[in-house]
């Protein structure tokens, strides 16, 4: 039965609402920005109205199936691990887009909101907000780059483990967190590599000048 519930979660996560909303707005959001078919790219391409709706729908596709299964007692404890992870993976590897989905941020918030009654998702949002403020200050008030945003998402998820430890969550929650961290790192791998490459090249140029 767990395999069936994981499949349901995967199918729910794979529903690419933001991409379809973009088409409704006569915009193929995969051809804009970083090509991400998720809610935040939709926001930039089609405007805040479509963007907000995309965020809500991508959030709900993570929240509703897990919340429903938990409320009915269909899954609990370690059984939630494959269901939660599959739901996020559905967005990242959507069969509706030839297995190439989005970054998985909004659906991640939905999953954690269902798992922990919003506690962990709120903590993650606070961490990201703090990282953003720090990044803006370090960038002298200028907007952060897409690469820095990707780094903050990953660092924020990594830092989230401190909150889990502080609240003494059960071990299966850590399993979901670790899988989520790997997924988020994977979906932002190109941004992380570009950021590393830019920093390395700047440092290399600086060392060359000082020699």
Image (cartoon, rainbow, N blue to C red):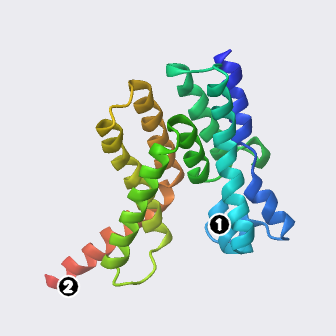
The answer for how far apart the CA atoms under marks 2 and 1 are is 39 Å
**Is residue 193 something one can see in this rendering?**
yes
Q: Nearer the viewer, residue 129 or 16?
A: 129
User: Which quadrant is home to the N terminus?
Assistant: top right
- Residue 140 higher or lower than 59, as above or below: below
Taking 124 as reference, is 24 left or right?
right
Name the residue located 64 percent from the left edge and 53 percent from the top edge.
102
Residue 149 spot, x, y in % from top left? 46, 65
Q: In terms of sequence position, does the residue under pointer 2 or pointer 1 come before the other?
A: 1
Q: Is residue 167 above or below residue 190?
A: above
Camera-side residue of 89 and 203: 89
For this view, does 206 lie left or right of residue 182?
left
Residue 93 on image: x %, y %:
66, 43
Residue 3 versus residue 130 in the image, above or below: above
Name the spot of residue 6 as percent of width and height, x first: 66, 26
Identify the residue shown where x is 73% and y is 71%: 49
User: Does the image show residue 37?
Assistant: no
Where does the image place residue 62, in percent across and percent down from the top left? 64, 42
Residue 162, quarter of the rendered image: top left
Numbered disc 2: secondary structure: helix
Binning the other alpha carbons within 10 Å of mark 1 as few (below 14), some (14 to 19) or many (20 upward) gives many
Reading the image, the residue beneath label 2 is: 209
Number of residues whose C-alpha sits closer than 10 Å to that of mark 2, classed few (under 14), some (14–19) or many (20 or more): few
Q: For residue 203, what is the image quadrant?
A: bottom left
Quadrant placement of the C terminus: bottom left
Which picture quadrant has residue 24? bottom right
Q: Residue at x 72, y 42 (%)?
A: 14
The residue where tag 1 is placed is: 41
Which mark is nearer the camera, 2 or 1? 1
- Where residue 15 is drawn, which disc sits there? none
C-beta proximity under 8 Å, tags 2 and 1: no
In this view, the residue farthest toward the top is 1
């Amino acid at each position: 039965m767990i395999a069936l519930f994981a499949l349901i979660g995967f199918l729910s996560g794979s529903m690419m609402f933001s991409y379809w909303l973009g088409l409704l707005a006569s915009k193929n959001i995969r051809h804009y920005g970083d090509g991400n078919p998720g809610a935040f790219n939709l926001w930039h391409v089609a405007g805040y109205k479509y963007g907000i709706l995309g965020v809500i729908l991508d959030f709900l596709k993570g929240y509703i199936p897990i919340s429903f299964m938990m409320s009915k007692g269909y899954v609990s404890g370690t059984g939630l691990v494959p269901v939660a992870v599959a739901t996020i993976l559905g967005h990242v590897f959507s069969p509706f887009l030839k297995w190439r989905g989005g970054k998985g941020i909004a659906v991640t918030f939905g999953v954690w909101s269902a798992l922990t009654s919003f506690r962990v998702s709120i903590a993650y949002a606070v961490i990201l907000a703090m990282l953003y403020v720090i990044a803006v200050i370090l960038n002298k008030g200028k907007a952060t780059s897409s690469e820095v945003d990707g780094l903050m998402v990953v660092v924020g998820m990594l830092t989230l483990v401190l909150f889990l430890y502080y609240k003494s969550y059960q071990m299966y929650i850590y399993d979901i967190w670790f899988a989520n961290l790997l997924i988020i790192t994977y979906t932002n791998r190109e941004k992380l590599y570009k950021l590393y490459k830019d920093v390395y090249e700047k440092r290399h140029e600086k060392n060359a000048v000082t020699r």
